Image (cartoon, rainbow, N blue to C red):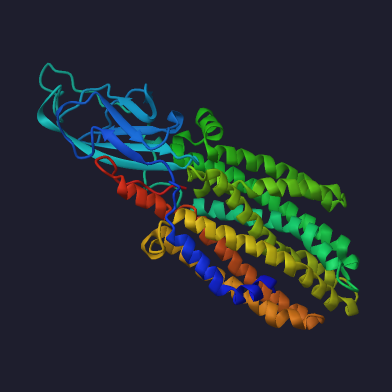
Amino acid sequence: MRTVSSHFGGRRSSWAALLTLLLLVPAQALAHTALRSSSPANGAHLGEVPRELRLRFNEPVELALARIALVGPEGAEATLGELQNAPDSATVVVAPIEGPLSAGTYTVRWQIAGADGHPVRGEYTFMISPGARGLAAGPGPAAPGQAAPPAGHHHDPTSFPTGEGFDANSPLYVAVRWLTFVGLLGVVGAVAFRLLVLPLAGRRPLSTAPMLYDSASRRAAHVGLWMAVVVAVAAALRLFAQSYALHGAGGAWNPGLLAALLSRTTWGWGWLLQAGGVVPALAGFAGAARGARAGWVTAAAGALALSFTPGLSGHAAASQELAPVAILADGLHVLGAGGWLGSLLLVMVAGVPAAMRLGHAARGKAVADLVNGFSPTALLFAGIVVATGVFAAWLHLGSVADLWERGYGRTLLLKLGVLSVVFGTGAYNWLKVRPALGSEEAAGRLRRSAALELAVGVLVLGITAALVATSPAVEMDVTEQSGGDSVAAAEPHP
């Protein structure tokens, strides 16, 4: 059904060569904040009790979203003072140790927010040797006449999330991202259908498009309106999920923590852009549903803004030097996917039903005109998807081997495998179904094959929602190479 399928088949070897070439070039962007060193160091055996924890990261840390806990030999948290940056570096976080410590093994658990606002966590251990200078009474009951060492909690333990709790790769969080992607696809698709597909369909000789123009436009506006509502609901759920992942149940709705999340992180700016973009989308679709032509311009502005929000809360925002280019490419990727599969959805749920309301003799011709108007836009938008997808693969994969050696690469391969089914279905529509259009029977076959194509496309969105929660191979390579004496297990990010 898409012209891109016929062109893609003839240029398959060229695309493969380009993809291989790009993947062989090492990506220079470094994704996400990483712990570079610490004092005490990981695995250190100390002969003197430390009075502070000092963690150095590869980029400045937002203290309002940072957390550090020091867990002693018996599992109690030592008392830590207020976190602060070192006087000479915003990349160093200092946590004063305010309570006495005993001999034994200590675990430092840390959590910070990356450039995109996502939690980055890890832990490491060190040991205070028996007889070390500055020791307090050892674990267990205090000696007669001696006060037991305090074991305070700088953070409420319920508000310090662990890898076993709710996080980026939790099924519910993945479902929220999937809901966001579905809504964005529908919003962009509605605008592309009304502003591109219908006008192109009307330019064909003896086109029936003028007969279904108003009906199809109003149907598209209603679909766009409902999809914008989905985006709005998903935005509220995303805010709660992100705050819960960062702050735990006790701080999820803390006004101060929410304000820091929204105002001091790229993730927060992206969320504010989503909240701001959904307003003109809702208003524009509502006006278009009532027949106001200006409503489509407003809806298009909202759709454009919404398309760039995923890049501000995903891997693109964490690509340090290339972040602006990565965010731009991610926005174009969303526009391409929406203009391709989203407008296909609108052809099926708005255009074809409007065509079926025409007279019996005009129905088949009207469906054919819609498909022929959709085909050139599909070629354009699918090309954008392929080009930006290749760029993202280059950015987040260190080498071709990462495709099967890393979780990110394996998930990407799964996405590409499922996406190949979408291309295959499209090729069938283009080669077999489209040439036979012109009758109601052919329109029925188109509906069935397009429904399969859309269903697989929705599955691709689900895999994409999971892919966003998987650490890029480049990030994992950097973590391993810089692990040194301080980095233990860094967890995936949302």
Q: Along the line of sight, which residue is nearer the eye, 253 or 183?
A: 183
Q: Across the whole image, how many numbered discs are drawn on residues? A: 0
Looking at the image, residue 344 sits to the left or right of residue 465; the answer is right
As displayed, is residue 454 above or below residue 232? below
In depth, the one of 400 and 345 nearer the eye is 400
Quarter of the view holding residue 278: top right
Residue depicted at x 66% and y 47%: 306
Residue at the left extreme, as displayed: 131
**Residue 415 in the image: x percent, y percent?**
51, 65
Residue 238: quarter of image: top right
Please report the residue visible at 69 percent of the width from the left and 60 percent of the height from the top: 339
Give me the residue at 59% from left, 69% from top: 456
In the image, is residue 386 above or below residue 50? below
Q: Nearer the viewer, residue 244 or 142?
A: 244
Q: Point out residue 363 in the picture as x, y percentages from the top left corner.
A: 85, 76
Q: Is residue 2 visible?
A: no
In this rendering, the answer to whether 170 lies above or below 86 is: below
Q: x, y percentage for residue 330?
A: 58, 52
Q: Is residue 398 left or right of residue 224?
A: left
Residue 489 lies left or right of residue 473; in this view the side is left
What residue is drawn where x is 19% and y is 40%? 43
Q: Which quadrant of the rendered structure holds the N terminus?
A: bottom right
Q: Is residue 73 visible?
A: yes
Task: Give residue 473's position: percent from left, percent from top.
Answer: 40, 55
In the shown orientation, is residue 5 left or right of residue 94? right
